[in-house]
Image (tube, rainbow, N blue to C red):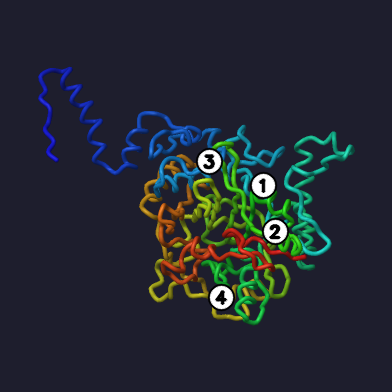
Amino acid sequence: MTVTAPRISSAAGLAAALAGWIGFVPLLAPPEARAQTAQATTPVTCGQIPSSPNFFPPAPTQIDASCAALPIDVPGGSAQGNVDLFAWLSFVAVNWPVDPATCTADKGVSILSAPVAPVWLTYASDTSVFVPAGQVPAPWCPQGVGAGQAAQQSLQGAELRLQALAAQRAARVARLPEKVRALAEAHPQVSLFLSHNAKGAGLLHDRMALAGADAVPVSGILQATGQPVVDQNGRFARYSVFMNDVEYAYLTANDLWTKAGQQKVTTISFPASSKSTGALGSMEVKAAWKVLGAGDDASRFLTQTAIVYNDEDSSPSPGPNPVTVGLAGLHLVRKTQSQPNWVWATFEQVDNTTRSFANPACTTCVANQPPTLVPYRELDATGKPLNPPTQVVPVIQPDGAAISRNPNFQGLLQGTPFAFYQLISAQWLGETLNPNPVQLGNSVIETYVKPGAATYGCVQCHTGATASPSNKASDHSFIINAQQ
């Protein structure tokens, strides 16, 4: 195509010509670049994005209360940039400060203000739902607490929330090994107990059982393939799994937390979001944590106080305990109307492969080599590390769309720990029903997974997910693991 420059005969003509060219030149640029150009002069809030008529909606230019709301579905058309935008909007919303009265986002407080517990840490954990015999799942906070009981009618939202959180914590504490439980009871301010698998508490054990291998205890220090990841201070990474209220309601309403309940259902299908009603769909949050120590800058992490322990001897980890842990990786998995096979987004703390879990100066370190000391032991009786650090080298770098998104959101979150997290990518299924991108994983959650289009991907792994112990197809989720 040949483009002829317009003739310019006056100042007005010059202005008109410039306007024409400004409107024309972006058409030659990539579509996402055009969207970014269009938003440069007009403020954009998170709340405006879902209703944008553009195939490529603009990214937000400011953080306001509308960013506390989870997007219902991927905005705009089917494109990687839009899925990555959906992932970042979800990340901001789940990390918004929690409202103590409702356990939802507090729109009266900003994520840009002083650090407050994020919403997702008040979600139900898998261990508070899949409880052992003699227990029932802890109530969602605050729904279900005191419902129908006259004695509870006068309780206010904040009191209900405290009661629900206490019930959730009690359920978690009840499942702890005896020695760890005693430590938890001595530290009632701690609600995070880190010792279970990155992909669900029983995944490794179930897979080994199905394969006919000898059953071994599933250690909560283990990540996706069964070996622990060791940080540069010699400490194991640990993992936690949470679910939102939609998924919790589905699991409890169908008694999928029991073996009998699993046998009764014909099909396991988690609720998806609805664009017409605005209802949210199921969501799972899977987090990787590191014990903060020498060389770690706590201001660059979402931090929590936690009790850490190892399943091998059912004892608290030697050395100081509780400890301060920092969020190293985060999977956000959401089922939506347009993505019934879920959207699989993964974020990492930016220091993972430059400081926390790798030594760039080590030229002899073998990449992604698991510890050789078996059975896995983290520390000796004095608290001294027993394993060399894992030299974590990512299989997947952030994709091109994520690279264009990350600086925008990191800039908007400047001054908070969340500015030090990056989206690696978000996997989804396009019209061909093939995963986009083809490979995706988190360097501290899928460290030892074999690279390859058939193996290194969220969809590839979760397509065959089953409930335990019924072995029924479980709609891409490994979380269902009945204990009674």
Residue 420: x percent and y percent?
Answer: 48, 50
Q: Residues within 10 Å of mark 1 (few under 14, many from 20)?
A: some
The residue identified by callout 1 is 245
What is the spatial separation of the Cα atoms under label 4 and label 3, in whole angstroms?
43 Å
Q: Is residue 407 above or below residue 16?
A: below
Q: Is residue 244 above or below residue 438?
A: above
Q: Residue furthest front?
A: 266
State which tag comes first along the sequence, 1 or 3. Answer: 3
- Labels 3 and 2 touching (C-beta < 8 A): no
Q: CA distance from mark 3 to mark 2?
A: 30 Å
Q: CA distance from mark 4 to mark 2?
A: 45 Å
Residue at image mark 3: 71
- Foreground mark, 4 or 3? 3
Task: Please give left or right for residue 158 compared with residue 201 in the image.
Answer: right
The residue at the point 45 percent across, 62 percent down is 353
x, y percent for residue 218: 66, 72
| Residue at screen point 55% across, 53% down | 333
**Image point (51%, 33%), residue name:** 47
Q: In what quadrant of the picture does the N terminus appear?
A: top left
Of mark 2 and mark 1, the one earlier in the sequence is 1
Q: Quadrant of the C terminus?
A: bottom right
Image quadrant assignment for residue 309: bottom right
